[in-house]
Image (cartoon, rainbow, N blue to C red):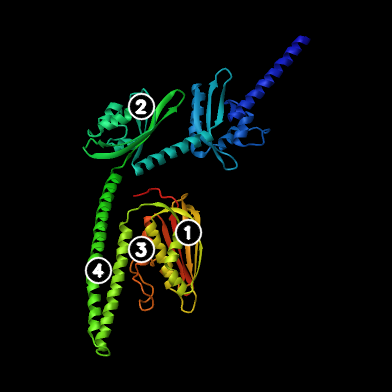
Amino acid sequence: MRNEVSALKKQVVQLSAKAELLSLAGRVSSLGTWEYFPEQELLNWSEELYRIYGIEDRKSGLTVAASEAYIVPEYREKVSKELQSAIRNQSAFAVEYQIMLSSGIRKYVLAQGFYMVQENKLVGTLQDITQQKEAVLKLKINETLLREAEMVSHNGSWEWIEDREFLLWSDEMYNIHGFLPHSVFVSLPWYASLVHEEDQRFFARDFLAALKTKRSFRTSYRIVRPSGEIRYVLSTAEYRKIGLNDFAYIGNTQDVTELRKAQVQLEEKVTELNRSNQELEQFAYVASHDLQEPLRKIKAFGERLKALLPEQENTEAVDYLERMGNAAERMRILINDLLAFSRATRAHRDFIPLELGVLLREVLQSLDYTIEQQQAKVELKAEQVIDGIQSQLYQLFMNLLGNALKFTVPGRLPEISIVGRVIFGHELETGELVPGAQYAELSIRDNGIGFDAEDAGRIFDIFHRLNPRAEYSGTGIGLAICKKIADNHSGLIRAEGQKGKGAVFTVFLPVKQTKRNQ
């Protein structure tokens, strides 16, 4: 008797352990169990089922009507038909539907089970599949978005599993090649037949080389649609492992026909523009040279005529001759400036390492007479080394410093500071410089007449003058030359000013040129 009790206790412990394990499994998988006795209208739920429904009070039990109230109305008829059919036919059932908790939260559930004839009851499981359904829904949304994105960008995706005969294509791949989606089976030999006959040789070369090396590839070629239309495409692919045992090329093919046409048109426009610019530069250079000789004669003959006139006589004629000589001199300066601008435009880019401090001191030495005459105070703090075109940078700084000494306020001694430092392109927040590249920043500040801030954008335009010629001489070309020289160095020049208080010209020049001797 004692042995029987001991064995019974052991069985109870084992059953309890199994029940606990079953409960834990149900909780991990969000799977609850239930049984329904149709004749008694009796419904029993497992603990996990209460948890899925979010019901805290589990002692009073749950009626059939109460459980049906949790089913979202549009699913109630469907669920009822499935359960009644299983009872009537004494068969299995499976049905997906939504329930709504008392908190208002909806869940997707899957109910499965069968009718037990001997015990006259319906038993089943109910699993919370909300996460799975939402994941599937998100996947469908992503697939739709991907399909639409491929259509907009004319970019199709494809997959070729190694040693398989056929390729898998997205819908846009069919559209690109002129076929209705899934209207043909895509094999490698068949696809090769779509490639333009002039491109088949290198297409086969690139593709076979990729198959042999198992490396990524990128190739451009033409295809011929069934209508005979020729399209340009660009295909890229990577070789990678998919699944447990398969390897495949995953790739995309983009229709770049319109891009190709735009590129060809752009190249034609650039070629045409370059030709026009060269002709214009050559014309300016030749015309400027040809104009020098007549000017020299005008000035020389004017001086001779002036010398032939008796002193103190015909003052009106002398005045005319002086005006003519002044006009000829202004024309000579203008021609020389035009020649300088033309040279800056046409110059070969022979870059060499330059010490800016040394170059700036040479410029200041050339201006020493003017500096001494005006009692100007010049401060120089710039010792950076950059790749540059020496003659052009000399001219750039000569123009900027010459302007600082020319556009001064009467009665105010000129003060000029030249400060240099090295910065990275991204430090200039306007985005006009290459991020990560190093630039020498040189600021030339003066206390001269300055200019209105609204003129800062126009000050580098050729022939643009801010001051009357009677007050300050010049042709309006000097700063245009500075900008052209900065452009030649892949750099930038900016101007800031305040009327009556001075100006700051800042030049940004790359420390290292990416292309030398262009």
Q: CA distance from mark 3 to mark 2?
A: 56 Å
Looking at the rendered image, the disc whose residue lies closer to the viewer, 3 or 4, is 4
**Residue 83: image location, x then y, percent:** 51, 28
Q: Earlier in the sequence, mark 3 or mark 4?
A: 4
Q: Residues within 10 Å of mark 4 (few under 14, many from 20)?
A: some
Q: Earlier in the sequence, mark 4 or mark 1?
A: 4
Residue wearing tag 4: 292
- Residue type, numbered disc 1: Gly
Residue nearer the viewer, 70 or 248 = 248
Judged from this view, the residue extending furthest toward the right is: 2
Residue wearing tag 3: 481
Q: Residues within 10 Å of mark 2 (few under 14, many from 20)?
A: some
Looking at the rendered image, the disc whose residue lies closer to the viewer, 2 or 4, is 4
Q: Is residue 31 above or below residue 144?
A: above
Q: Residues within 10 Å of mark 1 (few under 14, many from 20)?
A: some
**Residue 77: image location, x then y, percent:** 49, 34
Q: Is residue 99 above or below residue 299?
A: above
Assign a secondary structure to mark 4.
Answer: helix
Looking at the rendered image, the disc whose residue lies closer to the viewer, 1 or 3, is 1
Q: Which mark is residue 357?
A: 1
Is residue 456 visible in the rendered structure shown here?
Answer: no
- Residue type, numbered disc 4: Gln
- Residue type, numbered disc 2: Leu
Q: CA distance from mark 3 to mark 4?
A: 20 Å
Residue wearing tag 2: 211
**Residue 229: image location, x then y, percent:** 22, 39
The image quadrant where one finds the N terminus is top right
Assign a secondary structure to mark 3.
Answer: helix
